Amino acid sequence: MVWLQKFRKHALGKYLWLTNTISCGGLLALGDCIQQFNEKTLAKNKAKSYDWGRTGRMFLVGLSQGPPHHIWYTWLDRKIPRKNASAVVKKILADQLIAAPFFAFTFFIGMGILEGKKFSGGVEEFKKKFAALYLFDWCFWPPVQYINFVWIPTEYRVTYVNVATVAWDVFLSYIKHYDQ
């Protein structure tokens, strides 16, 4: 058990940035794995094979989003350090109005580039799918972020959000890969 305490101390202390980065990538890939399992289960064509390249792209985009997530929550806590109701509402609104559109945009651009599309192709996909994504974002994230900003210490915020993100990432993978 001592090794676990040491690992936790390093992962959530000295190597927090790296931990947050790897967890963003890993959990986005996990969300895609779950979504591909759902697709295969619900598909009429059960012969559809698993797309490891798709999961790899999701992992890489997740890795690219880890550092900005880390920076965002650190900055947000410095700018709005209190945990009273007013501060929590401000943090949730900032997260929804600034971070959510930014991360959605970078997700579609990053995925588009990794799929061999031009930048403009990623922008077009973002425009096409953002409304549905953002609507669900407003339903899902404010309660998650309320818990985050009220009860979760700063050093655990990205990890907590990443755990909640598994459900979100399944939906994100669905939105990204569903073309109707």
Image (tube, helix red, strand yellow):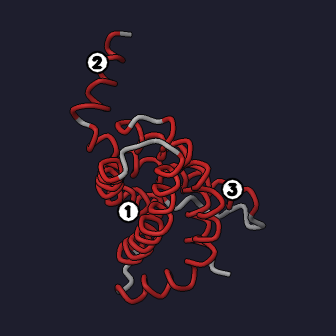
Between the residue at mark 1 and the residue at mark 2, the CA separation in whole angstroms equals 29 Å
Quadrant of the image for the N terminus? top left
C-beta proximity under 8 Å, tags 2 and 3: no
Q: Between disc 2 and disc 3, whose residue precedes?
A: 2
Q: Secondary structure at mark 1?
A: helix
Q: Position of residue 146 (x, y in %)?
A: 56, 47
Q: Position of residue 15 (x, y in %)?
A: 24, 36
Q: Where is 177 relative to 11, above or below? A: below
Which residue occupies 35% across, 59% down?
65
Residue type marked 1 = Val
Quadrant of the image for the C terminus? bottom right
Task: Name the one closer to the observer, 43 or 47.
Answer: 43
Please tell me how crowded label 1 is: few (under 14), some (14-19), or many (20+) other residues with Cα within 10 Å: many
Q: Nearer the viewer, mark 1 or mark 2?
A: 2
Q: What residue did someone put label 2 on?
A: 6
Q: Between disc 1 and disc 2, whose residue precedes?
A: 2
Between the residue at mark 2 and the residue at mark 3, the CA separation in whole angstroms equals 37 Å
Which residue occupies 52% across, 62% down?
51
C-beta proximity under 8 Å, tags 3 and 1: no
Task: Name the one closer to the observer, 141 or 4.
Answer: 141
Please tell me how crowded label 3 is: few (under 14), some (14-19), or many (20+) other residues with Cα within 10 Å: few
Q: What residue did someone put label 1 on?
A: 61
Viewed as shown, does residue 91 lie left or right of 134? left
Q: Quadrant of residue 14?
A: top left
Viewed as shown, does residue 68 lie left or right of 51? left
- Residue 48 numbered mark, or none: none
Which residue appears farthest toward the top when viewing the image?
Answer: 2
Which residue occupies 49% across, 43% down?
84
Between the residue at mark 3 and the residue at mark 1, the CA separation in whole angstroms equals 21 Å
Disc tally is 3
Q: What residue did someone put label 3 on?
A: 38
